[in-house]
Image (tube, grey):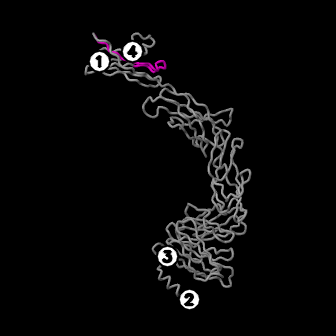
């Protein structure tokens, strides 16, 4: 009786396959493709090894080992039992399948990223030999062929034993402005497979390929942006620049797509598309703004315990300076200041003094040609500047457009009074307000000759954590500092009864 017959098996080339047959004690034999071992040709018989074991339970186990040579692929194996006075018993068929080296990968492609190259492929056909992943792994070869007559292999220690069907070369192995040939070798338990053909990759100097080389004001509402192409080899790259969205704020674009007339005081994102002769391409975003101020730095002043700031404006700017919001991390009232631009200089600098000790986050707004700050900041600095000590008291109001002003905050109502310098004309007071943590500011103007003070402003919210400041304005000139600042903290709102009493007695007050 055959207790256990042989099972089909799959092995890698050059390994060995073992077939097992267990009987109840009878003599076992083997057949390969219908021929018993004793009748096989010597060159086959000599390859085979039979090992017999007797178990403690009285059964007989025979193991037949066949080397995984290509000629034995598909061999049908049976065991048989011969007993006296009984016909021979045959097991079912067991087949030997041999997995050889793999054929080349398919669909090899290269994607040029911003600062790297990704190669991908389709795996070749393979049998499941081990029953676990992976049965296949890969090595990627890379050659620098910028000098086409002298390809240079690059040692890539990370490019072996890859189990996915893609690999991204880091900047350690891929440098800008060079052409690379990439190929893939599949491997399995049978050894190295067929190497693929080459795929070429090339990346320009993406760190500075295309950038706005200059932004200049055409008017208070329009700017011109010119782009420089700094690709490292124009014969290998074709670079184009286009906005993500064509809207009414793209007023005009040159035929070469290297110059755009855009609305002022906006944020833009353009898509930079780089096509190269190696067959790859890359698209990446470049963001910029058309605010008048383009960049700024802040630091603690060495000369006084204040904050020093330097800002750079676009060419031909009409802006009058910077409106600066300092947001204290401790939740204290915001600090509002103006740094005026002197003459036609595109640089503004100054020191912001008379501020409380704190760590500040900075929001920088344009002050436009008409003297009004932009509601949205042009620059937000994520770094913080810490002022350790107070720097004296706030200066006197001599020389200010306003001689005095007051603020009262009740619920969602702001009550403002402004006193102007004697004989002043065309003056107004500007109420600037901002909720803590909000990027934008609100602006309301009260004119000297048309406004009766006090005035009431109702905002669509309780004035919790708002900072209010009153500036004097004469034509297009603004006081550099607010004459009064107030902050309504949460839970500190005054009562409506107080408001009623105060308004009814405004003449006596």
Relative to 342, is 244 above or below?
above
- Nearer-N-terminus badge (4/2): 4
| Pointer 3 local density, CA inside 10 Å: few below 14, some 14–19, many at least 20 | some
Assess whether mark 3 and mark 2 are in contact (beta carbons under 8 angstroms): no
The local secondary structure at tag 3 comes to loop
The local secondary structure at tag 4 comes to strand
Q: Residue visible at 60% across and 44% down?
A: 113
Q: Is residue 376 left or right of residue 213?
A: left
Asked whether residue 431 is drawn in magenta, I would say no
Q: Is residue 317 left or right of residue 121?
A: right
**Residue highlighted by disc 2:** 507
- Nearer-N-terminus badge (4/1): 1
- Asked whether the viewer can see residue 35, the reply is yes
**Residue highlighted by disc 3:** 411
- Measured as percent of width and height from the top left, residue 126 is found at 49, 29
Kindly indicate the quadrant of the structure image that contains residue 222.
bottom right
- Check the image and name the residue furthest to the left: 57
- Measured as percent of width and height from the top left, residue 454 is found at 57, 82
Assess whether mark 1 and mark 4 are in contact (beta carbons under 8 angstroms): no
Q: Residue visible at 51% across and 75% down?
A: 412
- Nearer-N-terminus badge (1/2): 1
The N terminus lies in which quarter of the figure? top left
**Residue highlighted by disc 1:** 1
- Foreground of the two, 465 or 314: 465
- Nearer-N-terminus badge (2/3): 3
């Amino acid at each position: 009786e055959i207790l256990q017959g042989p099972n089909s098996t799959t092995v890698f080339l050059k390994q060995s396959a073992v077939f097992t047959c267990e009987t109840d004690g009878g003599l076992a034999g083997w057949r390969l493709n219908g021929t018993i071992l004793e009748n096989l040709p010597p060159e086959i018989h000599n390859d085979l090894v039979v090992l017999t074991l007797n178990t403690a339970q009285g059964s007989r186990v025979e193991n037949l080992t066949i080397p995984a040579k290509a000629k034995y692929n598909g061999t049908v194996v049976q065991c048989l039992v011969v007993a006296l006075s009984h016909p021979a018993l045959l097991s079912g068929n067991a087949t030997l399948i041999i997995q050889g080296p793999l054929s080349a990968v398919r669909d090899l492609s290269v994607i040029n990223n911003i600062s790297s190259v990704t190669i991908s492929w389709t795996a070749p056909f393979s049998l499941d030999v081990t029953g676990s992943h992976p049965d296949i792994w890969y090595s990627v070869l890379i050659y620098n062929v910028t000098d086409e007559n002298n390809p240079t292999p690059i040692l890539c220690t990370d490019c072996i034993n890859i189990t996915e069907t893609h690999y991204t070369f880091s900047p350690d192995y891929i440098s800008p402005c060079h052409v690379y040939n990439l190929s893939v070798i599949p491997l399995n338990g049978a050894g190295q497979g067929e190497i693929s053909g080459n795929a070429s990759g090339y990346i320009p100097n993406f760190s500075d390929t295309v950038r706005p080389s200059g932004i200049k004001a055409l008017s208070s509402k329009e700017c011109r942006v010119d782009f420089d192409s700094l690709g490292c080899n124009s014969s290998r790259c074709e670079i184009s620049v286009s906005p993500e969205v064509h809207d009414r704020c793209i007023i005009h674009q040159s035929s070469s797509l290297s110059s755009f007339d855009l609305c002022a005081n906006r944020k833009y994102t353009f898509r930079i598309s780089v096509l190269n002769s190696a067959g790859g391409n890359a698209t990446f975003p470049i963001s910029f703004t058309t605010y008048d101020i383009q960049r700024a730095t802040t630091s603690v002043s060495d000369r006084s315990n204040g904050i020093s700031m330097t800002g750079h404006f676009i060419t031909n700017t009409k802006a009058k300076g910077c409106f600066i919001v300092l947001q204290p991390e401790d939740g204290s009232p915001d600090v509002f200041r103006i740094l005026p631009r002197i003459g036609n200089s595109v640089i503004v600098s100054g020191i912001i003094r008379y501020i409380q000790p704190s760590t500040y986050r900075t929001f920088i707004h344009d002050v436009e040609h008409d003297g009004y700050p932009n509601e949205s900041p042009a620059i937000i600095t994520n770094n913080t500047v810490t002022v350790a000590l107070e720097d004296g008291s706030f200066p006197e109001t001599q020389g200010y457009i306003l001689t005095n002003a007051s603020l009262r905050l009740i619920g969602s109502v702001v009550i403002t009074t402004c006193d102007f310098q004697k004989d002043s004309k065309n003056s107004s007071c500007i109420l600037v307000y901002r909720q803590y943590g909000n990027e934008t500011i609100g602006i309301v103007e009260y004119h000297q000759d048309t406004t009766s003070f006090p005035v009431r402003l109702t905002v669509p919210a309780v004035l919790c954590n708002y900072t209010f400041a009153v500036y004097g304005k004469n034509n297009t000139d603004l006081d550099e500092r607010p004459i009064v600042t107030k902050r309504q903290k949460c839970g500190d709102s005054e009562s409506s009864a107080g408001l009623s009493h105060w308004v009814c007695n405004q003449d006596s007050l």
